[in-house]
Image (tube, rainbow, N blue to C red):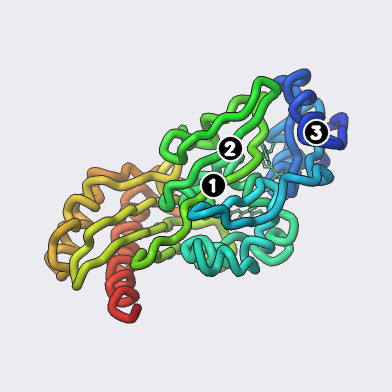
Amino acid sequence: MKAPKFNYVKAESRSHALQLLDELGEDGRIIAGGQSLMPTLNMRLSQPDTLIDINKIPDLGGITLDGNIVRIGALTRHVEVANSPVVAEHLPLIAEAMPHVAHHAVRNRGTIGGSVALADPAAEMPACVLALGGTMVVESVNGSREIAAEDYFHGLYETARETNELLVELRIPAKKTGDISVFMELAQRHGDYAMAGLACVARINGNAFEGLRLVYFGSEDKPTLASKAVSAVIGQAWSEECKEAATKALEDDLDPMANLQGSSAMKLHLQKVLTGRALDTAIERAEAA
Ligand SMILES: Cc1cc2nc3c(=O)[nH]c(=O)nc-3n(C[C@H](O)[C@H](O)[C@H](O)COP(=O)(O)OP(=O)(O)OC[C@H]3O[C@@H](n4cnc5c(N)ncnc54)[C@H](O)[C@@H]3O)c2cc1C
């Protein structure tokens, strides 16, 4: 199938894009890398009246370390994130996750802002941003606001961003000394969207978890922060019994959606398996550090 007819406007500046978003409302749609939007147009799953191209806006990309915050412009391509020394040193969770995002061709065009704006529940970057306690910066003609990742992801492709708001930047706390991160996912083929996945950030003392954030993706309708599984682990010496308690508690944290890739029960099983593997790996990484 071919895309339906649409108007196309190249935004010359950030303020031009904001003006267009405000004027067009529901009829306007930002296009960044186009790696998710164009397939949905071609399949007629989406029929916006006008595409607003933000690719030529000069100050929307780039990665900088600002104190203890890594600032990533929304238009930064996945490939730039993957190759960034700042990300490798200060956001190792994202560095570990990025090779799982699609394939080279998609990573060359797709943007981190597009991924977070779209909020696909099986996407890697939203889960990482939530696990790391990041903040989304959005702008409209009325000004700018910051939205914590905990408040940003509302549901299936639903976020706290309003129709007239442009996502301009992600602000993500840099790794603190002693932080351990682990990223794992299961997909049918490498580069496919995840059937189940886990972004984990931990603080470990000896063989006990002192702090832990577990964010699951690929099974729920949005990236999901676990609380019960974390409570089962914190302060306990890591052991097979503790692992069992954590995976049992996960049944109260998750309510997986069945889809073509598998049933709810199968996805819960996969997330349990990943939990055990990720926490074992976190302990190993802490011992090796
Ligand atoms: C074959 C294939 C496999 C893929 N596999 C994966 C995968 O395994 N994991 C994964 O995470 N992704 C995957 N993707 C998607 C890819 O990562 C996309 O690049 C990403 O989801 C969207 O980024 P984009 O820049 O292409 O956004 P676009 O397609 O341009 O836009 C996506 C949506 O976000 C909105 N948007 C984009 N930027 C902004 C902004 N700055 N402010 C407000 N709204 C904005 C658009 O209006 C649109 O609704 C895959 C894509 C393909 C084609």
Left or right: 115 in relation to 230: right
| Numbered label tally | 3
Residue at position x 55%, y 40% from top?
136
Disc with the residue nearer the chain's start (1 vs 3): 3
Q: Amino acid at mark 2?
A: Val
**Among the two numbered marks 1 and 2 on one chain, the one whose residue lies closer to the N terminus:** 2
Q: Is residue 219 visible?
A: yes
Q: Amino acid at mark 3?
A: Leu
Q: Is residue 130 above or below residue 200?
A: above
Three-letter amino acid code of the residue under disc 1: Arg
In the current view of this chain or complex, which residue is farthest to the front?
67
Residues under numbered marks 1 and 2 in contact, where contact means CB atoms less than 8 Å apart:
yes
| The quarter of the displayed image where residue 24 is located | top right
Local SS, label 2: strand
Q: Up-down: is 151 above or below 280?
A: above
Cα–Cα gap, marks 1 and 2: 8 Å
Would residue 64 be found to the left or right of residue 93 on screen? right
Within the image, what quadrant is residue 60 found in?
Answer: top right
- Which dot, 1 or 3, sits closer to the camera? 1
The residue that mark 2 highlights is: 137
- The circle on residue 51 is 3
- Residue 167: image x %, image y %? 64, 37
- Per the image, the residue denoted by label 1 is 171
Q: Position of residue 51 (x, y in %)?
A: 80, 33
The residue carrying mark 2 has its beta carbon less than 8 Å from ligand 1: no
Label 1: state its secondary structure.
strand
Is 236 placed left or right of 42 in the picture?
left
Estimate the x, y position of residue 27 in percent, counting from the top left: 75, 22
Dot 3 and dot 2 residues touching (CB under 8 Å):
no
